[in-house]
């Protein structure tokens, strides 16, 4: 798998990730905080075709660059809702499979931080948006939303193998084992 991380400091220090199939050169962005110049440079340098964007949730710091990305590349947009910031999206459901060349990912429902929150699991790694962070979880506005979020993390992420990497919407990456063991919300 081809993988890249782009930290977007101007947009709430959001993380944007790119994954691509090394055989077909088809690429996907996970979240779209901005069309940072490094993204087209990376795609061109690796001869990649951007065919998809997966949106973990619809907060501005994860979708602010989506319209520009769609205008430039015309990728399919996947999200937990049918429209993201004025852009039509394929509304994904929990356990839905998404093909990217010879790679396959699985969408997982991660509500709580937002009702439409979704994660994406590829072999060996999961993209958690703002649901699960290294050492924390995404903010919620009620105790019931916090419970919903923590249950989704336990049921849909902590059931993954311990060695799986987690790539978060903000901050550093981690592993399932580290978060199950040391994240203070789950101690």
Image (spheres, rainbow, N blue to C red):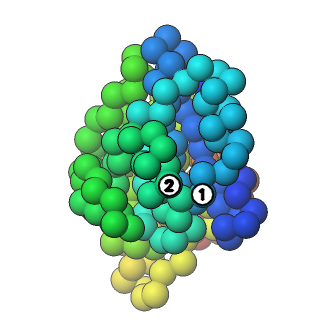
Residue 22, relative to residue 82: is it above or below?
above
Q: Is residue 154 visible?
A: no
- Horizontal side of 42 relative to 95 (left or right) equals right
Q: Quadrant of the C terminus?
A: bottom right
Q: Position of residue 175 (x, y in %)?
A: 64, 44
Find the residue positioned furthest to the front: 71
- Horizontal side of 167 relative to 75 (left or right) equals right
Find the residue positioned furthest to the bottom: 142
Specify few, some or many for label 2: CA neighbours under 10 Å numbering under 14, 14-19, or 20 or more.
few
Indicate the secondary structure of the residue bearing disc 1.
Answer: loop
Rounded to the nearest angstrom, the CA distance separating label 1 from label 2 is 8 Å
Residue at numbered disc 1:
34
Indicate the secondary structure of the residue bearing disc 2.
Answer: helix
Q: Quadrant of the N terminus?
A: top right
- Horizontal side of 15 relative to 72 (left or right) equals right
- Horizontal side of 85 relative to 97 (left or right) equals right
Q: Position of residue 83 (x, y in %)?
A: 28, 63
Whether the residues at callouts 1 and 2 have beta carbons within 8 Å, the answer is yes
Residue 164, relative to residue 144: is it above or below?
above
Q: Which mark is residue 68?
A: 2
Front residue of 75/112: it is 75
Front residue of 169/101: it is 101
Residue 144, relative to residue 82: is it above or below?
below
Find the residue positioned furthest to the top: 23
Q: Position of residue 116 (x, y in %)?
A: 33, 66
């Amino acid at each position: 798998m081809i993988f890249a991380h782009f930290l977007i400091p101007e947009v709430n220090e959001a993380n944007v990730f790119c994954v691509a199939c090394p055989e077909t050169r088809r690429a996907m962005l996970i979240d779209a905080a901005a069309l940072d110049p490094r993204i087209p440079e990376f795609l061109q340098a690796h001869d990649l075709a951007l065919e998809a964007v997966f949106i973990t949730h619809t907060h501005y710091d994860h979708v602010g660059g989506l319209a520009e990305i769609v205008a430039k590349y015309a990728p399919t947009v996947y999200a937990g809702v049918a429209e993201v910031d004025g852009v039509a999206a394929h509304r994904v459901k929990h356990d839905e499979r998404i093909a990217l060349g010879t790679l396959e990912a699985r969408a997982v429902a991660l509500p709580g931080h937002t009702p439409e929150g979704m994660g994406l699991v590829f072999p060996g790694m999961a993209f958690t948006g703002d649901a699960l962070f290294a050492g924390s979880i995404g903010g919620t506005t009620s105790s019931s939303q916090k419970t919903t979020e923590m249950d989704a993390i336990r049921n849909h992420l902590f059931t993954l193998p311990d060695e799986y990497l987690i790539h978060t919407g903000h901050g550093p990456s981690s592993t399932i084992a580290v978060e199950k063991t040391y994240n203070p919300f789950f101690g």
